[in-house]
């Protein structure tokens, strides 16, 4: 069976596909927040995490550090850093690989927002 499309049907089909693709792009961009602004609370969360990371070798130490970092990040308007801090906190009681992955994601969110890891 052969299907013949006229120019009008083809144009409508292309328009529908274009609308769907635009909708997908908008949906994905809305899901991933940009780096956001590095406000004081976000800066303090990032700095607290960086200063405590090397000493957080046990699950207890990780959880303690996560609590302190989340105390700062919840006061921030930077959603990306706050979200990554919560995820890092969840990974604090998990495997070393999960902890390092959460730490890397938080550190990257901090850097993307303009945080400077230089000693203060």
Image (spheres, rainbow, N blue to C red):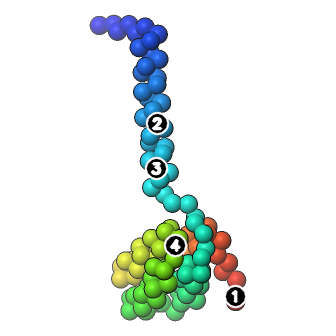
Q: Residues within 10 Å of mark 1 (few under 14, many from 20)?
A: few
110 lies left or right of 13: right
Mark 4–mark 1 distance (CA, rounded to whole Å): 24 Å
Q: Is residue 77 above or below residue 69?
A: above
* Residue at mark 4 to residue at mark 2: CA–CA distance: 31 Å
Residue 90 higher or lower than 6, as above or below: below
Image quadrant occupied by the C terminus: bottom right
Callout 2: 10 Å neighbours few (<14), some, many (20+)? few
The x and y percentages for residue 111 are 62, 71
Residue at x 33%, y 7% (from the top left corner): 2
Q: Which residue is mark 4?
A: 77
SS assignment at label 1: loop
Residue 78's place in the image compared with 7, above or below, is: below
Q: Earlier in the sequence, mark 4 or mark 1?
A: 4
Picture residue at 60% right of the left edge, 69% below the top:
37
- Per the image, label 2 sits on a secondary structure element best described as helix
Circle number at residue 21 = 2
For numbered disc 4, what is the local secondary structure? loop
Locate residue 47, reporting x and y percent. 59, 84
Q: Position of residue 92 (x, y in %)?
A: 40, 82
Q: Where does label 3 land, which residue?
A: 28
Crowdedness near tag 4: few (<14), some (14–19) or many (≥20) residues, C-alpha within 10 Å: some
Identity of the residue drawn at 46% across and 36% down: 21
Label whose residue precedes the other's in the sequence (1 or 3): 3
Q: Earlier in the sequence, mark 2 or mark 3?
A: 2
Identify the residue under disc 1: 119
- Per the model, the C-alpha gap separating discs 1 and 2 is 46 Å
């Amino acid at each position: 069976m052969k299907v013949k499309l006229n120019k009008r049907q083809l144009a409508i089909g292309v328009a529908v596909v274009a609308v769907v693709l635009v909708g997908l792009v908008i949906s994905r961009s809305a899901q991933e927040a940009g780096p956001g602004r590095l406000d004081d609370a976000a800066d303090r969360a990032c700095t607290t995490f960086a200063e405590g990371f090397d000493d957080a070798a046990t699950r207890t130490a990780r959880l303690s550090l996560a609590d302190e970092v989340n105390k700062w990040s919840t006061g921030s308007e930077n959603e990306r850093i706050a979200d990554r801090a919560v995820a890092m906190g969840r990974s604090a009681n998990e495997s070393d690989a999960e902890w390092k992955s959460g730490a890397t994601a938080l550190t990257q969110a901090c850097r993307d927002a303009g945080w400077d890891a230089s000693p203060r």
